[in-house]
Image (tube, grey):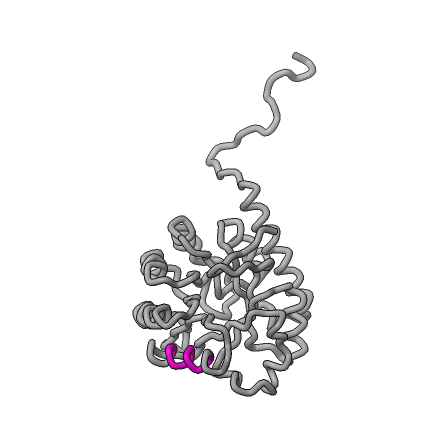
Amino acid sequence: MDKLVIAGREFSSRLMVGTGKFSSHAAMVAALEGAGTEIVTVALRRVDIDNPADDMLTHIDRNRYLLLPNTSGARDADEAVRLARLARAAGCEPWIKLEVTPDPYYLLPDPIETLKAAEILVKEGFNVLPYINADPVLAKRLQEVGTVTVMPLGAPIGTNKGVRTREQIAIIIEQAIVPVVVDAGLGAPSHAAEAMEMGAAAVLVNTAFAVARDPGAMGVAFKKGVEAGREAFLAGIGEQRDRAEASSPLTGFLHD
């Protein structure tokens, strides 16, 4: 598969994995292995980045994966910026998945606070990957201030509903000058394939792995879905038509 390039860094996998909700660290590691991911996002509020003996971090090989801290739980720009700075001070690379979700019920991102935080963090030298609603106008504004991706949600976090924001994501992809990573709501490998067939550069998955009976096997299934979707996109998917069009000639039958 062709390489994914973010901020000048190449990745062989187009499947990012989140680390929340797993029943055990062994289940998380199995999902990472199955998915073949190279980017693993970790909620800063769940780990002690300063402590190399943190129970979760000891299970993530930081020489193998890009550890992408996220600001999950931040309710405004100030909190998100503070978390990002703490991660960098603890020795993390200056990559941050920016999440600002003041609403505790639907976990929808705050567009104003997200843009405000992105402006600050980009100026401070962070590679910012912002989680956003599927808003094409906001996606353009974030790219203009220098974010290295945009990450529109397919559906609210943890819902497993798939790409419910398809029309808006299509516009974001059409206008994008940075990789578009579809994040949240992807519950089945077919959802990941759909996003990739549309032209998304990558997807991020967490809940679908964490709730699977076999997280490792689900990781493998998503990996195949991502690869199939990407290959189909590159091959060129035929346009949909309203009327039937015969795939075989309608003349020259044997009895003619």
Q: Which residues are magenta?
A: 80-87
Give the quadrant of residue 236: top right
- Left or right: residue 220 versus residue 241 is right
Give the quadrant of residue 254: top right
The reply to whether the magenta stretch includes residue 186 is no
> Foreground: 180 or 109?
180
Q: Quadrant of the C terminus?
A: top right
Q: Position of residue 194 (x, y in %)?
A: 53, 53
Q: Residue at x 43, y 67 (%)?
A: 127
Using the image, determine if residue 103 lies above or below residue 184.
below
> Foreground: 251 or 169?
169
Q: Position of residue 44 (x, y in %)?
A: 48, 80
The reply to whether the magenta stretch includes residue 83 is yes
> Foreground: 88 or 205?
88
Q: Residue at x 48, y 33 (%)?
A: 243
- Left or right: residue 148 versus residue 31 is left
